[in-house]
Amino acid sequence: MRHLVALLAAVLVLSLPAAPAWAAESAPALATPTAPAVEVDYTGIVSLRGCSGSVVRPPAHDPADPALVLTNGHCVRMLGADEVLVEEASDRVFTLLDKDGDGTLGTLRSSGLAYATMSGTDVALYRLTSTYAEVEAMGTRALELSPERPATGIAIRLVSGYWRHIYACHADGYVHELREDRWTWRGSMRYTEECDSKAGTSGSPVLDVATGKVVAVNNTANEDGERCTLSNPCEVDETGAVTVRQGIRYGQQTHQMVPCLTGGGRVDLTAPGCGLPRPAA
């Protein structure tokens, strides 16, 4: 994840909070291939400074609600130890792409940062000044967040608004703990090697080809084959055994955030089933 240094201003120390309940699930069985439900394109995709992102919604939503943009926590900034941001001021601009990725439909602006963390996962949600209905009126639509934990073996697409490139591969498995420098993430999705994403793809939505729904958000890669260092995450299993996979990329699952999105463009960390980390007491 060397681009974290190149694209953002500073790196602060981040320590590991207690694991959320969703991270403790065992790896799912191999998925049975199914025919694609939708053609994956740049619908709902945005670019932002140094990163990628997407306009997303939970399965149940009000078209009059402020729309949300999903990206990585490290695309906000390098967050501190145990740091979880909730309802922070933010005035950030996003470029909304057309479905072909050749042009733009306009710009979107945040009215606030609804949530961001790098503790246990690496996600951020910006609340927009535009509603879901207004985003649709611009000629696109929000991508739906899947409430289900994705299975191993599914065909996936990483859609980068920054590079306007779609990466195609499969979900190779799920990692008990992914450690990189001082950060630790749980339940990370490991991709097959065909997804050779690079700097600027951070925050790209990971779509299940069979459903067209968002199942993860792209965030890191082991670049040099080093062990648990910056830009070189390592996998740690339940026994503490460490595995290094040079050239392999990873993303963070997103199903655990769906119960937290109860309306109004806000994140309710106390909602039943919400699996996002909470701020330290």
Image: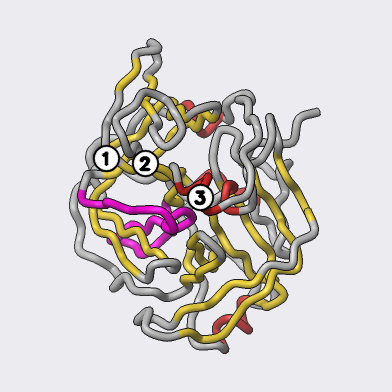
Circle 3 Cα neighbour tier, 10 Å, few/some/many (<14 / 14–19 / ≥20): few
Give the residues drawn in magenta, as a range.
194-215
Quadrant housing residue 247: top left
Q: Assign the C terminus to one quadrant of the image.
A: top right
For residue 187, side relative to residue 41 (left or right): right
Q: What's the residue at 37%, 64% (across, down)?
A: 159
Secondary element at tag 1: loop
**Type of residue at label 1?**
Gly
- Which dot, 3 or 1, sits closer to the camera? 3
> Which residue is identified by label 3?
6
Magenta-drawn stretch contains 206? yes
Quadrant housing residue 176: top left
Q: Nearer the viewer, residue 230 or 271?
A: 230
Q: Residue furthest top?
A: 239
Circle 1 Cα neighbour tier, 10 Å, few/some/many (<14 / 14–19 / ≥20): some
Report how many numbered discs are placed on residues in the image. 3
Magenta-drawn stretch contains 80? no
> Which residue is identified by label 2?
221
Sequence-wise, the earlier of marks 3 and 2 is 3
Report x, y in % for residue 264. 73, 65
**Type of residue at label 3?**
Ala
Report x, y in % for residue 169. 23, 53
Asked if 279 appears above or below 56 in the picture, the reply is above
Secondary element at tag 2: strand
> Which residue is identified by label 1?
247
Question: Residue 273, labelled with which disc?
Answer: none
Q: What's the residue at 63%, 84% (across, down)?
A: 134
**Type of residue at label 2?**
Ala
Disc 1 from disc 2: Cα separation: 7 Å
Q: Assign the N terminus to one quadrant of the image.
A: top left
